[in-house]
Image: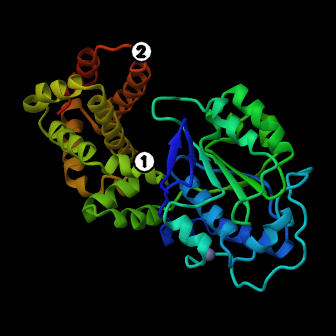
């Protein structure tokens, strides 16, 4: 049995590796599990919120495994819906049956039958509703199957779990179609929803959920997580600083293409006259390359502006300190003072944000790239 993915409905999804650093960063999730075990109540509808890339989906997978593990104490009590589900009047599950086994801890054991199934991509009773590759919304038909399964208990005897990732992508019709289920989850069912910003969800949905807030990751956690991905140490240190607590952002910035683009920009700000045309061609060649150029340029401008305003601050582009300082010096000399150089970077930065907006419309990449890059010809 392998992961099925039809119409954005993944039954028995492939496992999502969860690094210990991520668990440490989101210790609140472990605390919540402990509390549920202690109070013998598991909320049947949980909403995981937190900035993009902080690990919401991975933590939802972790919760799913912990709730289904045969040794955490949740499994036994799920039988007959004792611990889960039932009337969610206040977004809380019914009380546990009171026969909790004396299991220690709430971390999934990794060894029981349920854990082994989860770790091999054969988790039964776990279904994820995800965006289909070519779609921007979660449609009502993706939820039809769930509704048809009402009244079914779990196959394995533990909780039956449904994960709705990026729940804000639900169409109004889709949200309305699951609302009833969220209001009265069948016994033994648990819904996990993830969303970056709960205000993007209909209030009727949010009011049914218990909210678990995840914080942005610390820079050190992003760096530690990236170390699992065989990237050069220098690159990890730099992107971890730039990523603002988002692992997915860090991955985007550390990607080979993005990193190469950054190299081109550093060459450009050192010698615009010899690299200008090459960089224009690069930006105009492909919208994705232009986006990378803007992404990386944004980071470089942010460093130049911050260093000019707050002398002594650490550059986010840690490995490019000398290039940036050199550029700042030459720009100040050419523009007639540090204040004027700062105004130039701020003005370019504002232009960069406007270009981002303009890019959503059909664009002439060459004109926009020229417009953005040409003022450097008179800057250094
Ligand atoms: Zn287990």
Looking at the picture, tell me which residue is in the foreground, 39 or 252.
39
Residue 320, above or below 197: below
Please say if 2 is above or below 142.
below
Is residue 94 left or right of 344 when viewed as pictured? right
Q: Secondary structure at mark 2?
A: loop
Q: Ligand 1 lies in which image quarter?
A: bottom right
- Reading the chain from its start, which is encountered first: label 2 or label 1? 1
Task: State whether label 1 is within 8 Å of ligand 1.
Answer: no
Report which residue position mark 1 lands on: 249
Discs 2, 1 touching: Cβ within 8 Å: no
Packing grade of label 2 (10 A; few <14, some 14-19, many >=20) is few
Asked if residue 52 lies left or right of residue 193, the reply is left
The residue at the point 78 percent across, 56 percent down is 153
Gap between marks 2 and 1 measured at Cα: 24 Å
Q: Position of residue 304 (x, y in %)?
A: 32, 43
Picture quadrant of residue 315: bottom left
Q: Residue at x 68, y 50 (%)?
A: 162
Quarter of the rendering occupied by the C terminus: top left
Residue positioned 51% across, 29% down in the render: 135
From the image, tell me which residue sits under label 2. Answer: 361
């Amino acid at each position: 049995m392998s992961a099925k993915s039809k119409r954005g409905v993944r039954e028995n999804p492939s496992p999502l590796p969860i690094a210990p650093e991520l668990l440490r960063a989101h210790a609140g999730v472990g605390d919540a599990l402990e509390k549920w075990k202690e109070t013998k109540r598991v909320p049947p509808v949980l909403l995981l919120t937190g900035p993009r890339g902080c690990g919401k989906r991975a933590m939802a997978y972790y919760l799913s495994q912990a709730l289904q593990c045969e040794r955490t104490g949740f499994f036994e009590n799920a039988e007959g819906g004792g611990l889960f589900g039932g009337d969610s009047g206040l977004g809380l599950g019914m009380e546990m049956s009171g026969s909790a086994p004396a299991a220690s801890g709430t971390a999934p054991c990794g060894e029981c039958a349920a854990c082994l199934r989860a770790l091999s991509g054969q988790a039964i009773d776990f279904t994820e509703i995800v965006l289909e590759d070519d779609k921007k919304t979660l449609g009502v038909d993706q939820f039809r199957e769930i509704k048809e399964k009402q009244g079914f208990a779990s196959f394995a005897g533990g909780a039956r779990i449904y994960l709705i990732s990026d729940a804000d992508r639900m169409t109004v019709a889709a949200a309305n179609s699951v609302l009833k289920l969220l209001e009265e989850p069948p016994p033994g069912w648990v819904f996990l929803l993830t969303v970056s910003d709960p205000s993007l969800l209909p209030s009727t949905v949010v009011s049914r959920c218990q909210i678990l807030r995840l914080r942005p990751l610390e820079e050190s956690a992003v760096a530690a997580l990236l170390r699992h991905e065989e990237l050069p140490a220098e690159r990890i240190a730099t992107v971890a600083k730039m990523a603002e607590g988002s692992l997915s952002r860090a991955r985007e910035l550390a990607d080979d293409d993005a990193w190469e683009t950054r190299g081109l920009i550093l060459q450009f700000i050192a010698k615009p006259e010899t690299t200008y045309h090459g960089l224009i061609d690069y930006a105009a060649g492909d919208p994705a390359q232009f986006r990378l150029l803007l992404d990386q340029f944004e980071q470089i401008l942010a460093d130049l502006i911050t260093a000019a305003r707050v002398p002594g601050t650490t550059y986010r582009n840690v490995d490019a300190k000398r290039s940036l300082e050199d550029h700042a010096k030459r720009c100040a000399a050419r523009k007639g003072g540090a204040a004027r150089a700062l105004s130039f970077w701020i003005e370019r930065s504002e232009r960069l944000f406007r270009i981002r907006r303009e890019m959503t419309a059909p664009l002439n990449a060459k004109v926009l790239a020229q417009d953005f890059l040409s003022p450097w010809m008179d800057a250094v």
